[in-house]
Image (cartoon, rainbow, N blue to C red):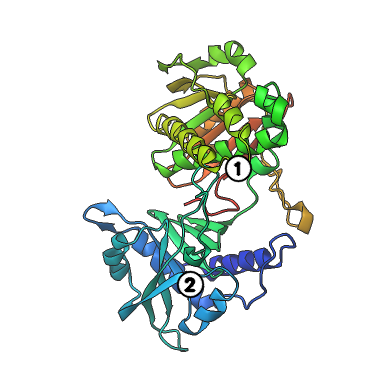
Amino acid sequence: MFEESIIHKIIDAWSDDQTHPHRGRKQKPLPHLQDIRIIVEKSFLASLKREEDRPITFSITLLYKNSIMEEQSFGRKQLIMPFEESLPFKEDSIAKIAPAFDLVNSSLIVAPKDETRIEYEIWGVMFYRPHRSRFTENSFAFTDFDYFRPDVITVTATSPGSLLISREDSIIGRFINGSFERSTPSPIGYALVPYLLDAIKSHEGFRKFQNKYWLFYREALLYLLFQAAKRGHGGTIVLLPSNKIEQYENVIVSKYVLKESFKLNELIVKVLSLHSGDIAARSGLNKIFAERLDFLAQSSCIDGALIITADLDILSFGSTLDAPKWGGSIIKGPDGLGSNGFETGGEAIDVSKLGTKHNSAINFAGACPDSIVFVISQDGPIRLILRKNEEKIILYWPDCLTSMFVEI
């Protein structure tokens, strides 16, 4: 169904990930081309189906029965539960059984029935822990009962026609509407750093805790974006420097305005001020912090933009960005893989292929040089748009969230 070149792109992305000097991968044979073709094509077709008039989500892992012990011998064990009778690996079978399992913590296990690779079967399901962040991490570890994503190829259907290709906790690439785009490091971890540091350098917490504050703040922003994307509504989130609010309010048509501070900065300082032994208090404050970020994420789900300050306070939501048309250049931001020769970036972006929401964000970023704009698409990616200092250049990243780590 798909061109063979697409399947080769997936295998090439897997190979590059495996040989990357910073990944520390166990060297293993590349996935078989026919195996990749079958699981991607069947998963794509199954993602287009609906069960009880609802779209289905699921995760499929390619794991051969004779390789279970090998995968579990590297400290990343899974709870593997074979079915008494295998199911045919077909779209209808996936659609019927997928609602029984949450893709956050489980995956259907698929393999060819024999070496001919003519028929494939769903022979079981594996359980592993969900992705954890600072705000959801359990303070107490029970290693005998902890399970992890395996270092084998996994295909996850997050929405109709949208697939994530991953291994362990890392995403290899994203497959959307018949095309595959390999992952790159999130710009939030490198390209956005000087812009964010400039926005938070006046914060009390940054002056007091420096790098600890920065790491907490960055993880909070990632969590907010992930939670907004997880809701599947799409939206726009604008981060404004606190000292530029009045300067930029003439290009924002505010709809719902909130006046009370959310006190998230005070919470960060409170958490970082705790003694290292205050595990229960830290866990409790992290949970409170996450609940407030969830509130922010939900407010991005209605039509219009969520406008927040660098202090993570809401200025308004449901707002319209009304800046004049940007007349400068728009280029793809660098991908940050220069250390191993794969760095790309600088290609011109064809705005004619972008919708109204993205063009409004581009115009706003052009008119407000210190702003950072995130556009959340319903099909999964989160675009990052910002103006490169005072230059007549807009930097555009196609996906700034899921690029290196599985966040589902």
Mark 1 to mark 2: distance in Å? 50 Å
Compare marks 1 and 2 and give the one earlier in the sequence.
2
Q: Which residue is mark 2?
A: 37
**Residue type, numbered disc 2:** Arg
For label 1, the crowd category at 10 Å Cα-Cα, with few meaning under 14, some 14 to 19 and many 20 or more, is few
- The spot of residue 97 in percent (x, y) is 29, 66
- The spot of residue 264 in percent (x, y) is 53, 27
Q: Residue at x 55, y 63 (%)?
A: 168
Q: Residue at x 65, y 50 (%)?
A: 185
Find residue 214 and report its image quarter.
top right
Q: Residue at x 50, y 67 (%)?
A: 144
Q: Residue at x 61, y 66 (%)?
A: 14
The local secondary structure at tag 2 comes to helix
On-image quarter of the N terminus: bottom left
Q: Which residue is mark 1?
A: 277
For label 2, the crowd category at 10 Å Cα-Cα, with few meaning under 14, some 14 to 19 and many 20 or more, is some
Find residue 180 and report its image quarter.
bottom right
